[in-house]
Image (cartoon, grey):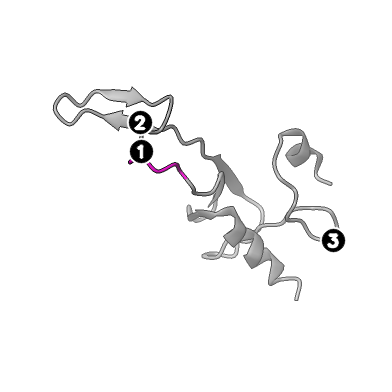
Amino acid sequence: MNLFLYSHGISIANHRRDGMIHYRCPACAARSRFNLIEQHAKPIKIDVNTGELTLLEQLDPFHLPYNGPERRVQCATCGLIEDEIRFIKMAETDQL
């Protein structure tokens, strides 16, 4: 398995039989240069009169929690940013 990904806490659940994770850009088909973007959502509330930002400890009843992906990938060749699963699925089509 890729020791770098494992040691940095990156999920390797989606890997090929060879034990390595593979990406392919859906736009330009690049296979080797990517940026991993880890998303950590923080709930905030903005006072519409003053513009003051308040970090919420608990969500109030009308504040939905973030339910997007924890990680996105940017192709370092063309700049496309998508969910990680899209890059993985594009690489899986190479195996067929």
The disc labelled 2 sits on which kind of residue?
A: Ile
Q: Which residues are magenta?
A: 61-66
- For the point 21% across and 28% down, the residue is 47
Residue wearing tag 3: 17
Query: Which numbered disc covers residue 61?
Result: 1
Disc 2 packing (10 Å; few <14; some 14–19; many ≥20): few
In the image, taking residue 27 as reference, residue 18 lies left or right, namely: right
Q: Position of residue 76 (x, y in %)?
A: 55, 49
- For the point 76% across and 56% down, the residue is 15
Snapshot quadrant of residue 5:
top right
Mark 1 or 3, nearer chain start: 3
Q: Position of residue 96 (x, y in %)?
A: 75, 76
Query: Which numbered disc covers residue 3?
Result: none
Q: Position of residue 82 (x, y in %)?
A: 51, 55
Tell me the element at label 3.
loop
Q: Are marks 2 and 1 in contact (CB under 8 Å)?
A: no
Disc 1 packing (10 Å; few <14; some 14–19; many ≥20): few
- For the point 54% across and 64% down, the residue is 28
- For the point 49% across and 47% down, the residue is 67
What separation in Å lies between label 3 and label 2 (alpha carbons)? 42 Å
Tell me the element at label 2.
strand
Residue wearing tag 2: 44
Does residue 93 show up magenta in the picture? no
The disc labelled 3 sits on which kind of residue?
A: Arg
Mark 2 or 1, nearer chain start: 2
Q: Nearer the viewer, residue 48 or 32?
A: 48
